[in-house]
Image (cartoon, rainbow, N blue to C red):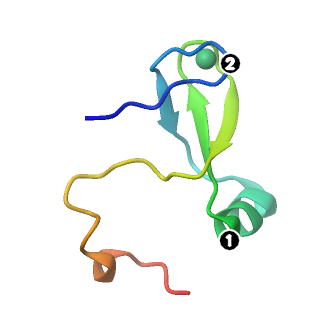
Amino acid sequence: MSQTACPKCYALQARRVKQEGFVQRFVLQKLGYYPWECRFCKATFVLMKRGHRQGESRAPSNDATTS
Ligand SMILES: [Zn+2]
């Protein structure tokens, strides 16, 4: 199991947060970036991964996003 580290404080407390605003919802997502937030230092940042959900990797049809 891999955890996501905060790039600022390196705590393994990063979590995916809801995409807010036009930039995050459209631009960043098109580029493959997703917003994250560190629960430890409250820093927000974007990463090229959307987090891991169990059993998601081979079930793209479950995803509502079509592009
Ligand atoms: Zn942090």
Instruction: Name the residue located 72 percent from the left edge and 69 percent from the top edge.
Output: 26
Task: Give the residue number, with chain letter if any, for mark 1.
Answer: 30
Image quadrant of residue 22? bottom right
Instruction: Give, as a three-letter code, the residue at label 2.
Output: Lys
Q: Secondary structure at mark 1?
A: helix
Left or right placement of residue 65 versus residue 6 in this view: left
Instruction: Name the residue located 67 percent from the left edge and 44 percent from the top edge.
Output: 46
Residue at the outermost left position: 55
Residue at the outermost right position: 23
Q: Position of residue 9 (x, y in %)?
A: 62, 12
Task: Give the residue number, with chain letter if any, for mark 2.
Answer: 8
Label 2 vs 1, first from the N-terminus: 2
Q: Secondary structure at mark 2?
A: loop
Pointer 2 local density, CA inside 10 Å: few below 14, some 14–19, many at least 20:
few
Whole-number angstrom distance, CA of label 2 to CA of label 1: 25 Å
Q: Is residue 52 above or below residue 55?
A: above
Q: Is residue 49 above or below residue 56?
A: above
Q: Position of residue 18 (x, y in %)?
A: 57, 49
Q: Position of residue 59 (x, y in %)?
A: 25, 75
Left or right placement of residue 54 versus residue 17 in this view: left
Tell me the quarter of the image containing the N terminus. top left
Image quadrant of residue 57? bottom left
Tell me the quarter of the image containing the C terminus. bottom right
Instruction: Give, as a three-letter code, the residue at label 1.
Output: Lys
Residue 64: which disc? none
Q: Is mark 2 within 8 Å of ligand 1?
A: yes
Q: Is residue 24 above or below residue 15?
A: below
Q: Are marks 2 and 1 in contact (CB under 8 Å)?
A: no
Instruction: Name the residue located 22 percent from the left edge and 53 percent from the top edge.
Output: 54
